Image: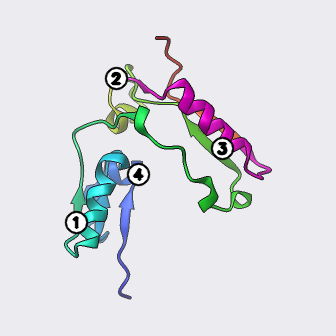
Amino acid sequence: MGKRIVGGGPLFTVHHQEYDDVDHLVLNEAELTLPQFIDDLRGGVPRHLYESDSWADVTTTPVPLWNLINPRVYGSLNLQYSRGCPYDCEFCDITVLYGRVPRTKTKNQLLAELDALLHLRMEGRRVFRGRQFHRK
């Protein structure tokens, strides 16, 4: 078919060994691995696997560009408050995905993201997501 398949997100990060047929695996946090993949793709030399041992600084994460989607086709949209978790629950893979040290966005980031979500013409839910709410 001539189309490349790019896999990323929690499923591929945790189980990437099971997806040899996927052309490019962009694992871990996209802030760290996606820019290199895009640069390599533009240069005509994309690798099969992109991963990082570092954690993204969520205080530099931009407000999502909600104008790029049609919010009417979604039942809910999420605002992510934090990543990481100090706990080690046996049923949860959050520490594998986001580490053990909680990282939170700033108050101004949250307000900007909430404002952007509130301006969407959407009938579904808006969900505030964080692993835990930590006090500083």
Residue range in magenta is 101-125
Q: Are marks 1 and 3 in contact (CB under 8 Å)?
A: no
x, y percentage for residue 90? 38, 28
Q: Quadrant location of residue 47?
A: bottom left
Tag in front: 3 or 4: 3
The three-letter amino acid code for the residue at tag 1 is His
Q: Write down the residue under mark 1.
A: 48
Rounded to the nearest angstrom, the CA distance separating label 3 from label 4 is 23 Å
* Number of callouts: 4
Q: Earlier in the sequence, mark 3 or mark 4?
A: 4
Q: Write down the residue under mark 3.
A: 116
Q: Are marks 4 and 2 in contact (CB under 8 Å)?
A: no
Around disc 3, counting alpha carbons within 10 Å, would you say few (fewer than 14), some (14 to 19), or many (20 or more)?
Answer: some
Rounded to the nearest angstrom, the CA distance separating label 1 from label 4 is 15 Å
Rounded to the nearest angstrom, the CA distance separating label 1 from label 3 is 35 Å
Q: Secondary structure at mark 3?
A: helix
Q: Secondary structure at mark 4?
A: loop
Q: Write down the residue under mark 2.
A: 101
On residue 31, which mark appears? Answer: none
On residue 9, which mark appears? Answer: 4
Q: Secondary structure at mark 1?
A: loop
Q: Are marks 3 and 4 in contact (CB under 8 Å)?
A: no
Q: Earlier in the sequence, mark 4 or mark 2?
A: 4
Point 73% across, 46% down: residue: 119
